[in-house]
């Protein structure tokens, strides 16, 4: 069965990658757009509003990390999935990618069937109109409104990357409940998505920097829980 025609933007400065990956994705029924630099990728993303972006890290003019960060600042692209497709496997670049707001990190070379399987898994996690949206949560001086994608802390609006928002919403949905790391990975990233072991830790650290260290507690050897400040 062919894919549902989701729009995918490929951003890579290697023409062979654009041609080969683009060809395989078109054969799966996707609408494919291409860009050869980070700067061009940001411009095209704003224009076509893709469902998913495959983004290289090392590019001239503007690298993938900066491009990802700029895309995440565009309100119309809040729901766009971003996955890095790159030959760089160093841990620090993965961490930088996730901090910039990426959803997944796929290392080249990757077999076409494996790549399309990963993309399908990512696209399945897009919210649909039929899915139930959690209700607005008031937790002390922290307000989370999943329907509006809106967070306020002591009356000040917080701008969180999508995965940080989803992680905070999950933990805050049941204050005091300990969420095991495996459940967090499954609920936020999906079982078919392979990410580095430090992914959750990076997102927790970034959240603590923004909402305070005392709200998200570490339960050693298990996972994390959210506690309400009185």
Image (cartoon, rainbow, N blue to C red):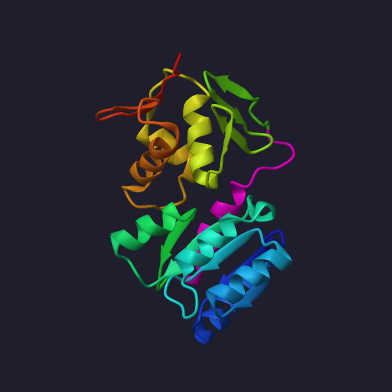
Specify the quadrant that holds the N terminus. bottom right
Q: Position of residue 137 (x, y in %)?
A: 60, 23
The image shows residue 17, relative to residue 93, as above or below, that is below
Quadrant for residue 229, please give it: top left
The image shows residue 142, relative to residue 189, as above or below, that is above
Q: Could you say which is closer to the camera, residue 10 or residue 72?
A: 72
Q: Position of residue 182 (x, y in %)?
A: 38, 36
Q: Is residue 118 magenta?
A: yes
Q: Could you say which is closer to the camera, residue 80 or residue 100?
A: 100
Residue at the farthest left position:
221
Q: Could you say which is closer to the camera, residue 189 or residue 213?
A: 213
Instruction: Evaluate whether residue 28 shows in this view.
Output: no
Q: Position of residue 55 (x, y in %)?
A: 51, 68
Left/right of residue 20 with respect to residue 63 in the rendered view: right
Instruction: Evaluate whether residue 206 shows in this view.
Output: yes
Q: Position of residue 218 (x, y in %)?
A: 31, 28
The image shows residue 11, relative to residue 182, as above or below, that is below
Q: Name the residue rendered at 46%, 56% in the picture.
A: 100
Exactly how many numbered labels are in the figure? 0
**Residue segment shown in magenta:** 111-131
Residue at the farthest front position:
155
Left/right of residue 30 with respect to residue 88 in the rendered view: right
Residue at the farthest top position:
230
Q: Could you say which is closer to the camera, residue 138 or residue 123?
A: 138
Q: Main secondary structure of the magenta part?
A: helix
Quadrant for residue 134, please give it: top right
Q: Is residue 82 magenta?
A: no
Q: Name the residue rendered at 31%, 48% in the picture.
A: 197
Q: Name the residue rendered at 65%, 58% in the picture.
A: 51
Q: Name the residue rendered at 42%, 52% in the picture.
A: 99
């Amino acid at each position: 069965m062919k894919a549902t025609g989701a729009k995918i933007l490929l951003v890579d400065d290697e023409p062979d990658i654009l041609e080969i990956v683009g060809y395989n994705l078109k054969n799966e029924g996707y609408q494919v757009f291409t860009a050869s630099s980070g700067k061009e990728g940001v411009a095209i993303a704003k224009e076509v509003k893709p469902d998913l972006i495959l983004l290289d890290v090392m590019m001239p003019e503007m690298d993938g990390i900066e491009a990802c960060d700029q895309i995440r600042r565009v309100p119309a692209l809040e729901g766009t999935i971003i996955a890095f497709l790159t030959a760089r496997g160093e841990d620090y670049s993965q961490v930088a990618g996730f901090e910039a707001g990426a959803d997944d990190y796929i290392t080249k070379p990757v077999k076409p069937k494996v790549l399309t399987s990963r993309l399908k898994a990512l696209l399945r996690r897009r919210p649909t109109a039929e899915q139930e949206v959690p209700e607005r949560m008031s937790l002390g001086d922290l307000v989370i409104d999943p329907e509006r994608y809106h967070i306020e802390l002591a009356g000040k609006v917080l701008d969180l990357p999508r995965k940080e928002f989803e992680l905070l919403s999950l933990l805050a949905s049941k204050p005091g409940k300990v969420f095991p790391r495996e459940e967090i990975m499954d609920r936020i990233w999906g079982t078919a998505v392979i990410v580095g072991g430090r992914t959750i830790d990076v997102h927790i650290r970034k959240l603590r920097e923004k909402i305070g260290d005392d709200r998200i507690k570490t339960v050693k050897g298990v996972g994390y829980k959210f506690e309400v400040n009185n």
